[in-house]
Amino acid sequence: MSRVVTEPYRREIIGAKGSIFYRAHSYHTKVPPEGIVPVIEHYTNPGDTVLDPFCGSGMTGVASLLTGRKGVLSDLSPAAVHIASGYTAPNDPAALADAARALLADLADLEQELYGTKCGRCTGDARIEYTVWSDTVVCPGCSHEVLFWDAARQPDGTISKNLVCPLCSSSFRKGDTEIRPGAPVLVSVGCLSCRSREQRPLTPVEMKIAHQAHRSEITDWYPTAPLESWREMWRGQHGKMGIATAADFFTDRNLRALAAVWKQANTSPERLGLRFATTAIVNRASRRYQWNPKRPTNVLSGTLYIASMTYEFNVFSLLRRKLSAVIQLAKKVGETQGQCSVTRSSATDLNHLPDQSIDYVFTDPPFGANIYYSDASFLWEAWLDDFTDTTNEAIVSTSLTAQHGGKTLNDYEKLMAASFGEIARVLKPGAWASVMFHSSDDAVWSSLERAIESADLTLESAVAFDKSQPSFKGVKQMTNQERVSSFDLVLHLHSTAGGVAKRRQAITASVAEQDVLEAIASHLQTATPRQRSTPYLHSFVMRLLLERGASFAGYSYGQVEVLLSKNFLFEKGAWSRAQTSNSPASIKIEGTA
């Protein structure tokens, strides 16, 4: 029997990103499943059915497994369906381990051919763990070809935007030059005998293998899907660097290795687990990993950017580590009591689900124009040879034509309204839906509220979700490079007759700017430093407006930042109350810290 819940979940949610359930496979956005667990337990009983129609990487399904519920997941993206299935489908850990050993054994000779070398210390057998590649640029001053590695690196190892030609000393910018095929400049070698690790310039033999035209020797299938210039993530730099297809995101050597691994994975009895492990290394095995003098930096999510100096990681070393993680994941999934199914479908059409069949919904839909998911999934979907139909992709993309998935804010709102209508249809009477959302744009928030209002759902509360670690865009915000919100809100919606429209008619209170200032002032009295950051306070203001049914107009991220700067003190990344007699009076809204 379904649990009767009359009060929404009101505690702020914290989710860490360190568990195997989170890190086995990357995705553009991901909600730590441990943060979803207490919310599921608040709204449902063991055995109840939990839906996520924008499932992404499948973390709602993982939380359902952990709590003994039945997860029902769906997504428009074939990459999302593949990844969510890999996270939630049961696998025999022993059989998967045997298949992993067999795959690596079958391809051991190929690894030796592509990455084998000798240790510089003991002369024993060793393998190249990674090679650093540098673009070649043409100096505008003397027309000589110059390695970016030589022109941009400073004495302290950092990279300068102003390049200096080592031949004629001309100073120039990368964007003003012609880019030609790059060259390897550094290798990291791990010895199989003395176990030492060394980083050094390449030997002549290593240089020859790196430059070898391996693509002509590839007999296995590899993706040749074009990177069309109409894509949101296409940049002129791709053309300059010769990036015309998915295959061009990889060095010839890594493309040859991945093609061989993909063939083995697809013909194995443990196909699901091996394919999951392989796509989990695709981005790291590509040219998208930017070289850093201190440590490898992650692929920039939400872009298809390729830097001028990149890592070429040993595909088999990546795979060994990832297979170990996927086997560990299989063991953990096997210990859970829940179930999960994953279906490919648009959230606007859940026709595979009967009316009033779902006990609870937890979902994390696209946030307007934040991420272009189909482009961000390009490399995964190229290897899967299956691409997102962008017709119903719920994004805002005004630079694209309708033919290629372009949509206005109004189009986005219609798709979200249709999705919320389907959520309301499949929810049991009196059941709840939790929707995770954030946006820096007040117009997107207004669009979301209207979409909810069109369904038979009542907004009862909103709480902050702290993922503990900021996204790449969140990091940029904290360094004042970009103004974005990095704290999500979880909106708790109740399936009741009348919906938000009825609730809003009953609301008579308005929220004036002074009300907002007083709420912030009250919050700052007891807030932690993290809860006094600009991203948190923007989410705090959005929550206040949501719960009072007020307009979002005038409260974009940038406008909230201006409001804070005029009324509060900012020091060491946190806001505090100004110590004056004119400080806003103290009030406190329900459920805040």
Image (cartoon, helix red, strand yellow):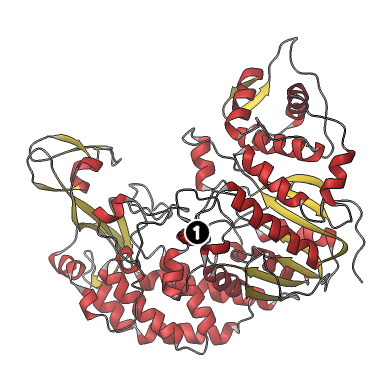
Q: Secondary structure at mark 1?
A: loop
Residue 321 locus on image (x, y percent): 46, 70
In the image, 308 versus 543, the foreground residue is: 543
Residue 444 locus on image (x, y percent): 63, 43
Q: Residue at x 59, y 39 (%)?
A: 440
Density class for disc 1 (Cα within 10 Å; few <14, some 14-19, many ≥20) is: many
Q: Does residue 459 appear in this view?
A: no
Q: In the visual, does 17 lie left or right of 182?
A: right
Q: Does residue 468 appear in this view?
A: yes
Name of the residue lying farthest toward the top: 581
Residue 243 locus on image (x, y percent): 29, 60
Q: Residue 283: which quarter of the image?
A: bottom left
Residue 535 locus on image (x, y percent): 61, 37
| Residue of label 1 | 405
Q: Residue at x 54, y 83 (%)?
A: 96
Q: Is residue 324 above or below residue 409?
A: below
In the image, 157 versus 389, the foreground residue is: 389
Q: In the visual, does 372 lie left or right of 247?
A: right
Q: Residue 509: which quarter of the image?
A: top right
Q: Residue at x 57, y 31 (%)?
A: 558
Q: Is residue 193 above or below residue 408?
A: below
Amino acid under label 1? Gly
